[in-house]
Image (spheres, helix red, strand yellow):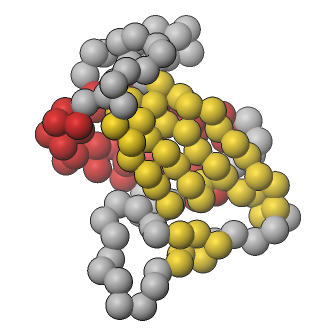
Amino acid sequence: MQILHPKGWAAPVGYSNGIKTPVGEMIFVAGQVGWNAAQEFESPALAPQFEQALKNVLAVLACAGAGPRHICRMTAYCCDKQKYLDARHDLGAIWRTHMGRHFPAMSMIFVTDLLDHPGLIELEATAVLPS
């Protein structure tokens, strides 16, 4: 993958502006919330839900033989902007644990609610496995 960063732009923090991928197999991961394999939320807090949602994304990718380094785009939907801002330090540590220093193109969208209650965050991803 090639990180796309226009000359003169300030460096993004925690994401890439764009990613160019080689031809390969595309994997689309549906929105994953912070519940376990039995579809039960183990915590009402944002950081543990984020970690579980990220683990769920990675579990789906693993079914295709892909891992964190193959993610080229991720979208996060969060129900509470202030909780997100308050948890950024913890979320960064969780990210580094599971994703290392890989930062795909990302969007953060704040929404009023998610389908699965008491979910606070949902992650979806697109990955590319090189040919």
In-front residue for pair 7/72: 7
Q: Can residue 97 be seen from the camera position used here? A: no
In-front residue for pair 98/78: 78
Position above or below: 103 against 83: below
Which residue occupies 36% across, 31% down? 111
In-front residue for pair 79/11: 79
In-front residue for pair 5/128: 5
Quarter of the figure with residue 129: bottom right
State the image coordinates of residue 54 (x, y, percent, origin top left): 47, 37
Counting the numbered discs, the total is 0
Position above or below: 34 against 89: above
Quarter of the figure with residue 31: top right
State the image coordinates of residue 43 (x, y, percent, origin top left): 30, 15
Q: Quadrant of the C terminus?
A: bottom right
- For the view shown, which residue lies furthest in the right direction? 131
Which residue occupies 44% across, 46% down? 98
State the image coordinates of residue 115 (x, y, percent, origin top left): 48, 15
Position above or below: 61 against 20: above
Position above or below: 44 against 79: above
Q: Using residue 92 as the reference point, say whether residue 32 is left or right of it.
A: right
Q: Can residue 39 be seen from the camera position used here? A: yes
State the image coordinates of residue 106 (x, y, percent, origin top left): 46, 55
Which residue occupies 44% across, 41% down? 76
Which residue occupies 35% across, 60% down? 14
- For the view shown, which residue lies furthest in the bottom direction? 7
Q: Quadrant of the N terminus?
A: bottom right
Q: Using residue 72 as the reference point, say whether residue 119 is left or right of it.
A: left
